[in-house]
Amino acid sequence: MKKLVLTLLGLLLVLGLTGCGGGDQPANSQNQDQVKLGIIQIVQHPSLDAARQGFLDVLKENGYVDGQKLAVDYQNAQGDQANLQTIARKFVQDKCDLVLAIATPSAMTMANETTEIPILITAVTDPVSAKLVKSLSKPGTNVTGTTDMNPVKDQLKLIKDLVPTAKKVGIIYNSSEINSQVQVDVADKAAPELGLQLVKVTVTASNEVMQAAQSLVGRVDAIYLPTDNMVISSLSSVIKVAEENKIPVIAGESESVEKGALATIGIDYYQLGRTTGEMALRIIKGEKPQDMAIQGQDGTNIVLNLQAAKKMGVTVPEALQAKAKKVIK
């Protein structure tokens, strides 16, 4: 009986030491060579998933393999703010060595929970407006990483290249998401210069996205989707409405074009994640995030989906196809 009790107590102790840092144990106490990484992601969708994969691939290529020199605790909040807070607190309690925060809501929540654990951010549009860093060149906090600020004006111009007669452009976004509001503000300034008028529709939940898209039917000549986590997670709803009503959809990033949007001049999120992974390696080697400048992506790429063009009633000019980095046929 005594042996049974001791065995059960041992099992409970082992179970209690799961997570980034083994409960109250100091970071790396179980394995001095193992980096304990927490990954907090607001929602699952192709862009954010690609950034995460790029990050992990760089670590793996440099010897940090999950289960060996790396212990990964990946948590997805499924779009729920309460879940984000629970995950962030768990990572702090578990004493993670490093946290990757994917998208603005994840980054803000994680930064509110700790000023000690180094936080790498990616897919965050404006880290300064989100109050994650003091400046892009010198963060001055425990946060650094990469921004996915996209070329909004160029993306709106792409609408004119594809639909020269376009006058009104619908834009669907979550107004409570800072990165989305930043992009809409840029679009507001750029649209008049391009002879475009924005028709804005806001959503507060992913199940409102289809209704938002339907509300634009008959009112707009095209739809523009910024890199809004809530909207992109329901991209298929927008695509369905667009195809049924022959409305071209221009996206803020290339993964959405892969999934059925017409075109973008966008960021490669996998490469963005890789850049963030390179920065993580520097932190593991001893650099401080407060001294590491926020990185962006050099150059952007035209991506076209000719299948989507056909379904949305658009003829893509040959000259534009020739300039594109990728053409989906």
Image (spheres, rainbow, N blue to C red):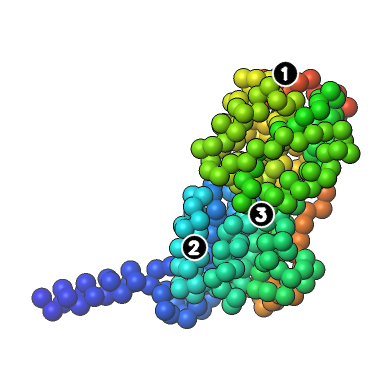
Disc 2, SS: helix
Establish if 142 lies above or below 81.
below
Whether residues under marks 3 and 2 lie with C-beta atoms below 8 angstroms apart, the answer is no
Number of on-image labels: 3
Circle nearer the N terminus (3, 1): 3
Disc 3 to disc 1, C-alpha distance: 33 Å
- Marking on residue 85: 2
Residue 145 placement (x, y as % from top left): 69, 63
Q: Amino acid at mark 1?
A: Gly
Residue 230 in the figure: left or right of residue 150: left
Establish if 157 lies above or below 310.
below
Q: Amino acid at mark 3?
A: Ile
Residue 159 placement (x, y as % from top left): 80, 31
- Marking on residue 178: 3
Question: Pointer 1: what residue?
Answer: 313
Q: Amino acid at mark 2?
A: Gln
Circle nearer the N terminus (1, 2): 2
Residue at the spot x=65%, y=61% of the render? 121
Quarter of the image where the C terminus is located: top right
Residue 1 placement (x, y as % from top left): 10, 76
The answer to whether residue 303 shows anywhere in this view is no
Instruction: Answer few, some or many: residues within 10 Å of disc 3's Cα (few below 14, many 20 plus, some between 14 and 19).
Output: some
Residue at the spot x=73%, y=64% of the render? 128
Circle nearer the N terminus (3, 2): 2
User: Furthest residue to the left?
Assistant: 1
Of the pair 203 and 229, the residue shown nearer to us: 203
Disc 3, SS: helix
Residue at the spot x=68%, y=48% of the render? 180
